[in-house]
Image (tube, grey):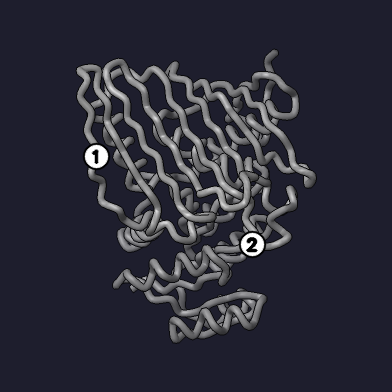
Amino acid sequence: MVKVIIVGSGFMGQTHGAAYKNMEQVQVVAICDKNVEKGVKFSEEFFCTYYESCEAALEKEDIDVVDICLPTFLHEKYVLLAAYYKKHIFCEKPVTLSLESLDRMISAAEEAGVEFYVGQVVRFWPEYQEAKKMYTDRLDEIKSVYCARLSEHPKWSDWYKQVDSSGGGLFDLHLHDIDYLCYLLGKVKSVYAVGKKNTYECWNHVTSILNFENGISATVEGIIDMAVGYPFTMVLRLVSENQVFDFEMKAGSNLENVADAKRNTYLYMNTGESKKLEIEMKNAYQIELKHFISCINEGKKSDIISTESVRNVMCTILAIQKSLETHQEVMVDYKGVGVIETRI
């Protein structure tokens, strides 16, 4: 039995809690949150203890995993705390906003001898898993790739509006597709991006062109300032010599009612044939957490998302940020701590 404490009782904490309820090998033993009312209510759902202080929970409870579902700017503090107490760590995305911060977290986990998992959930989304399988097994040479993620601005809290707290749409929304494409196609060689900032200096309208080391290029669109009421939209299109894989999903605001989303995946062929792919609708967050829990039970590292891959994605996002600021193509440098070269 893997014993977990969830730190944060907001939307993602509730999402993780619901997933753990369906997993026999997991027990949520404590909920931690500075908001007493929300934390107590959440803990009552699991018949477990509420703590205002995460450190107090770590001192008193027998636990294996700290699941961090807090605002982005708090992640490093609690990852380092969990590592200090030698607990395995699951942290929601975006894990942090700088490469220096990420390297500190990775080093702390390694020194403590614990696993450090980051919840970049699109790698576990059923349609994206199917695209990965088809790319690996069946699709011929890829000619172009297009991804989109469109959303109205979340209304969660004032912290989300601040670029130093959330990273804005670039880090919180655009990162999902950048992460998936790095998982699918490998390392990015260079990027070029254009976009618009909002009044809080967040890059909330971004279009990026990624040039991968394997020669494939991808166009990625991310907007987190769509009109109020615009359905949360995800698009993935892989165009090969003879086939097109095409997925689109339109859900409710910020995925709160994803169960009612309209999801369609088609495979088009040069023969003129097309077919709708019947993909089982599974909860990606539950798939993700079940995978990480099984890794802990088996004492192994994840073969789907490693800290190295998380770091590579961070380097790519920072290169996109540099391109947005300089209006130049930017080479992604994976060697140094936050070192990025530019190319006109």
Q: Earlier in the sequence, mark 2 or mark 1?
A: 2
The mark found on residue 304 in the picture is none
Q: Alpha-carbon distance for marks 2 and 1?
A: 35 Å
Question: With 172 as the anchor, is 136 left or right in this view?
Answer: left
Query: Between residues 343 and 160, which one lies in front from this camera angle?
Result: 160
Q: Residue at x 51, y 49 (%)?
A: 231
Q: Which residue is mark 2?
A: 156
Are circles 2 and 1 on residues that touch, CB within 8 Å?
no
Q: Is residue 63 above or below residue 286?
A: below
The mark found on residue 277 in the picture is 1
Residue 186: x and y, percent? Answer: 43, 29
Residue 8: x and y, percent? Answer: 58, 69
Q: Residue at x 52, y 67 (%)?
A: 13
Name which residue type carries label 1. Answer: Leu
Tell me the SS state at disc 2: loop
Where, quadrant-wise, is the C terminus in this rendering?
Answer: top right
Query: Between residues 224 and 122, which one lies in front from this camera angle?
Result: 224
Tell me the SS state at disc 1: loop
Residue 107 visible in rendering? no
Residue 47: x and y, percent? Answer: 44, 86
Where, quadrant-wise, is the N terminus in this rendering?
Answer: bottom left
